[in-house]
Amino acid sequence: MNLAATLNADLHCHSTVSDGTLTPEALAARAHAAGVQLWSLTDHDEIGGQQRAIDAARALGLPYLTGTEISVTFAGRVVHIVGLGFDHTAPELIEGLRATRGGREARAREMAASLAAAGIPGAFEGALKYVGNPDLISRTHFARFLVDGGHCSDVPEVFRRFLTEGKPGFVAHKWASLKDAVGWITRAGGAAVIAHPGRYDFTPTEEYALITEFVAHGGRGIEVVTGSHTPAEFTEYADIAREFDLLASRGSDFHCPEESRVDLGTLPPLPASLTPVWAALADRIHRPTTVGG
């Protein structure tokens, strides 16, 4: 298996185990059909779908890296840290993610109360209809309820009118610390990666603080090519990867065929001048013994 930067790796997507609409098995099949050569399922704060993903990938002859996306509170904002190539049976990681998921139901009920005050009743029960894992009820599930209930035309409109700071339905939640998230991943044998850094709207000073603290705690990579980045941001974060000597990652952040900006396996390759995260995790890749269909 050639582990060059041009490999069609997709190391960021979500299943019904968190806030995606496809099962781990369906995602594996979609990735394989799209020509993905190395895949990872990175459900939010959850690794309950990892063995299913490993088994599905193996049956298709698709190399696989374990994955998750951990919600972190940094400088008063939510930042996401992707973990790749870890031992998905590591007790500390399992317990850390369980604790991070705690409190989502209470938060969801507060979100529903806020929406009810704005004239939209029944949001908690409505959102639950879209939840595969009740422990991970999230804004995405509320967004689907608001679209299907006719309150908004699409998900982008939801986040313009609701569920964001200062709008009805927004409730802040304190997530894991950056130090804890990176530590859980690292001690389980994996590599921590800053997810979609262009989404956080940090000032240059805030972004520098995030990256330097991340590196100080043992963080190793950054997503350069991802579904929410523009071509200009591909270049910007490639430069940052070089500046901080970070491994580069690539992933669509696929959630749903009808909602996601980018499908599995369709992103441009990483710039060849970068060291891809998968090259550093070669011994952590689950490789099929035979190549299937």
Image: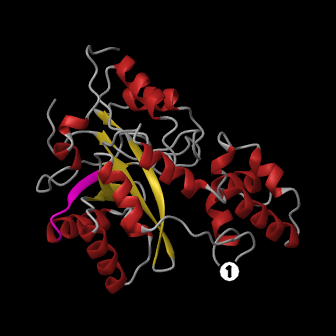
In the image, the segment drawn in magenta is 244-249
In the picture shown, does residue 267 fall above or below 118?
A: above
The residue most toward the left is 273
Spot occupied by residue 16 in the image (x, y as percentages of width and height): 59, 38
Spot occupied by residue 204 in the image (x, y as percentages of width and height): 32, 83
Q: Quadrant of the N terminus?
A: top left
Residue drawn where x is 43% and y is 40% of the image: 41
Residue drawn where x is 38% and y is 25% of the image: 57
Q: Is residue 247 left or right of residue 41?
A: left
Spot occupied by residue 35 in the image (x, y as percentages of width and height): 32, 30
> Which quadrant of the structure image shows residue 242?
bottom left
Depth check: give the residue in front, 272 or 245.
Answer: 245
Depth check: give the residue in front, 64 or 145.
Answer: 64
In the picture shown, does residue 17 fall above or below 172?
A: above
Q: Is residue 285 left or right of residue 14?
A: left
Q: In what element is the residue under mark 1?
A: loop
Residue drawn where x is 49% and y is 64% of the image: 176
Q: Is residue 15 magenta?
A: no
Tag 1: Cα neighbours inside 10 Å, few (<14), some, or many (≥20)?
A: few
Q: Amino acid at mark 1?
A: Gly
Depth check: give the residue in front, 197 or 171.
Answer: 171
Residue 149, can we see it? no
Reading the image, the residue beneath label 1 is: 166
Depth check: give the residue in front, 167 or 68.
Answer: 68
Residue drawn where x is 76% and y is 43% of the image: 129
> Which quadrant of the structure image shows residue 202?
bottom left
